Amino acid sequence: MPDVSRRDFLTLLRDGLLAGSGLLALGGLTRFLSYQTEPPPTTEFDLGPAANYPIGSRTRLPDVPAILIHNASGFSALSLVCTHLGCTVEQKVDGSICPCHGSRYDEQGNVLRGPANRPLRALRVEPNAGGHLILHTD
Amino acid sequence: MRPSFFHHLHPPTIPAAQAQWRYTLGAGGIAVMLVLVLLVTGALEMFFYIPTPDQAGPSIQTIAFLVPFGGLVRNLHYWAAQALIVVAAVHLLRVVFTAAYVPPRRFNYLLGLALLVLSLLLDFTGYALRWDEGVRWALVAGTNLLKTVPWMGGGLYALAVGGPEPGGATLIRFYAWHVFGLVLPLVILSAWHLFRVRRDGGIAVPPPTARATAERISRNELVRREALAALIAGVALLALALWRAAPLAPPITIGSVGIAEARAPWFLLWVQQLLRWGDPFWAGVFVPLALTVGLALIPYLLPGPPRSQLGRWFPPGGRLAQIITGAIALLMIGLTVLALYP
Amino acid sequence: MSALLVAAWNESRKPRPVVLVPTLSGRPEYCLTCHADVPQISAAHPTGTFGCVSCHGGQPLALDADLAHSTMRGGRNPSDFSVVEASCGGANCHSGSAAEGRDHIQRALTSVQTTYAGAIATVRYAFGAQSGPGAQQGIYAIEDPHSATGLTALTAFDPAHDANPSVQTFAANCLNCHLSAQPLPGAQYARFTGCAACHAPTAGTGVQLNAPTLHQLTTAISYAQCNTCHNRGNYSMRDLQFHPRTDAPADRLRDYYQPIAQFTRCEYTLDCVDCHTRTEAMGDGDIHGNKKEIQYIRCKTCHGTPTELPLTKALTDPNDIAFRLALLNPVVDLKIGDTILVTEKGEPLWNIRALPGGAYELFGKASGQRFTFRPVMGSRCTQNPEDQSSASCHQCHSVQR
């Protein structure tokens, strides 16, 4: 056992206790600041009767934001949230472009040009009992 | 006379070389003045500003259009904040290009760098307090960057945003950081930074034996020069504030159609440009962080010039640091220009 | 010192803010700082009660024109149907209950003037784009599961999905007179879209649509306002073009677009709204496939038949809707105890009052003019009461053109 004087030991103990208190306080502060006051956002959107969206239509849903597509294979929806850093992409004739960092997607949401490297998220669309379309974002 | 902080900063006489415009550029002093302007105008704005998503826009419009001199106060706050970033960056370049960071001023160099980081954070949080369509995407992209950090991304996001997406909780958080959480360290570090200037022997100059002239200037002369600098900077600031109003767009509303172009605030345009090319974490988090750490390590890792080479621009002993810092500065300016004129 | 003086001088150059605190919202608005010259829109919407923002939107505190106007609803016209619910809607305003007659927006949005369902169906059927003549599509999709007409939904007419070039030509050239369409250029066609298409008196005034003084809503709608759509030219089935008339129709009798049409005196002397009712013009809340389904006023509604007098109603309830309508357009001083005409569906013809001697008086809603007329009963008329078509009555009652 190395020779530790009483003074050295007490100094070490003091520093250790101070560091421990500091870490504990930092942990408490992190938990304090991490408390989430906002409720989770809605994940279900009632889009109204399916008849409002004729076959071949592409409807922008600004509240979601998403685009509802009705084609021969039925209803589908694409999120308009850019997979790069979350800005809302803008619709162009042949796809969409992100205003923040210039990612481009084609009409099916596939990446045409970076920086995004994942396609736009496909969202679930299901009719409910009343014939309304329900869009799920989760 | 009782010793005071003022007298600590203003000794009876100092070497004339320490107070030459063409050496110091007056940048540090102007930065102090800008911080004071920001504290006063910011405190005035707090009498009207309401940090909620519903009221942020209307309360800023109240300040900008209805309160007598409110527009002036807001414009001064805005322009002083933008000027502070420029002046602080110039101050940093001056210190590196004159090798003033060598011991014993190594620690004060770190303090200054911390102040620059605080100023940038204050500028970004203040920018977000506008809570208008103009800041929307910068806020979304800026906070989403935190999510890309490995291991702790989700936690950092929760800490900064306070909810699943930017909203009321985010605004009040940014407000708390902007008016207190970041201002308090800024004021404390500023005072410390100033205190250390005198403790480290004033502004970096060669030792008495190596000086070209032994001329010294009096406290009165120093204060006179400072007042002149403050006056010129103040008039320029006032002219800016009267000439160009601080930007303001309609408040953020859910589902509104985005503006055609989503630009980052000007001092982050270089990051936005990097993000157009690279992975969000590397371009948006790692590179800025690495640059800051790199700058902080300059006095510790790179060779500095001997004291006899102090007190002049581009001493040969600090060539490597000058080249690296200059390259970084040019790169940032180049990226910014590219972002502005694609 | 001089800097402060410059700042003070700059401050003094700003316009003095003019505040308005509408009693409805209680929130201050500074629009009048610049817009002091805009007249009150109608007696029913006093500026002091409604202010500007509850209808127009915008940023009420901003004294910078671009910012203040940036979030306005529908540009100059908040009643455009794309924004009408936010501007004019609300349970206490124009999207309230049908029982109180406050469902104007729901009715207007399903009316044939808005959906254009009849014209679209006729054209699509004629060119084989749909198998039956019934209405299937409207200018935009609507649904009403409880529609009394049995027509519960219309899908949106999208010419891009009609392969037939004739339908596409129709869509390109002829869709300019439903209530969401921009009018043709020319003062005689000048109207807004949405509610203001009819309720803002634009026709014949020569006032530019963008003039700030054109800030008026009225229920005294003159025939000239109806003419911005209903007498502005004709379709040609030969070249599938709409041919707008090049003249400004001045003579109501002779300048009508269909040369074969017959008129009797009341048809070119009165204004359209003197006889045609609210539900005929604005819809009854159900989806209709064509104009015939909704238009029901006939000669006998006012004149009766050889065997029956027109339907009447004695006003006993001070809350009767007839009083509200007469208040909005005070051309007649209706009193409790007065007898007015009503339609078969019970709608009040509040501007037509029975006179003691068996005659009736009509007050022109737009002109204010007083007319008197007698019922058919007791006259020499031998018309079969069920034959009320234009060709039937016009046999005798027609003016040579």
Image (cartoon, coloured by chain):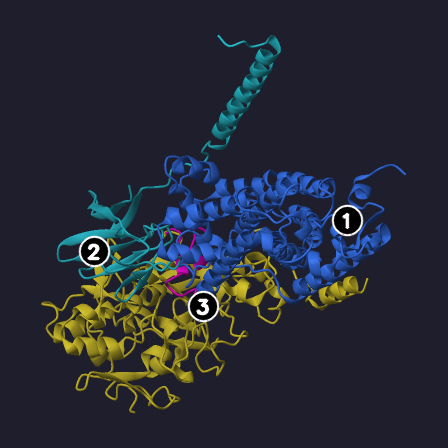
Magenta segment range? Answer: C74-97
- Residue drawn at 29 percent across, 44 percent down: A137
Image mark 1: chain: B
Q: How far apart are marks 3 and 2 (CA)?
A: 46 Å
Query: Residue C234: image x %, image y %?
Result: 26, 84
Q: The blue chain is which one?
A: B
Q: Mark 2 points at which residue?
A: A51
> Please, is residue B78 above or below residue B156 in the view?
below
Quick one: A118 or A61, which is closer to the camera? Answer: A118
Q: Which amino acid does label 1 sit on?
A: Pro
Tell me the tag on residue A83. Answer: none
Q: Name the residue under label 1.
A: B208
Q: What residue type is labelled 3?
A: Tyr
Nearest to N terminus: mark 1 or mark 3 = 1
> Please, is residue C391 above or below residue A125 in the view?
below
Q: Mark 3 points at which residue?
A: B341
Are dots 2 and 1 in contact, CB under 8 Å? no
Image mark 3: chain: B
Quick one: B158 or C103, which is closer to the camera? Answer: B158
Helix, strand, or loop for circle 3? loop
Dot 2 crowding, Cα within 10 Å, few <14, some 14–19, many 20+:
some
Q: Which chain is yellow?
A: C
Q: Main secondary structure of the magenta part?
A: loop
Q: Nearer the viewer, mark 3 or mark 2?
A: 3
> Please, is residue B239 above or below residue C49 in the view?
below
Q: Can residue C318 be seen in this view?
A: no
Residue A39 placement: quadrant: top left
Q: Which chain is cyan?
A: A
Quarter of the image that includes the C terminus of chain B: bottom left
Query: Residue C356: image x %, image y %?
Result: 43, 68
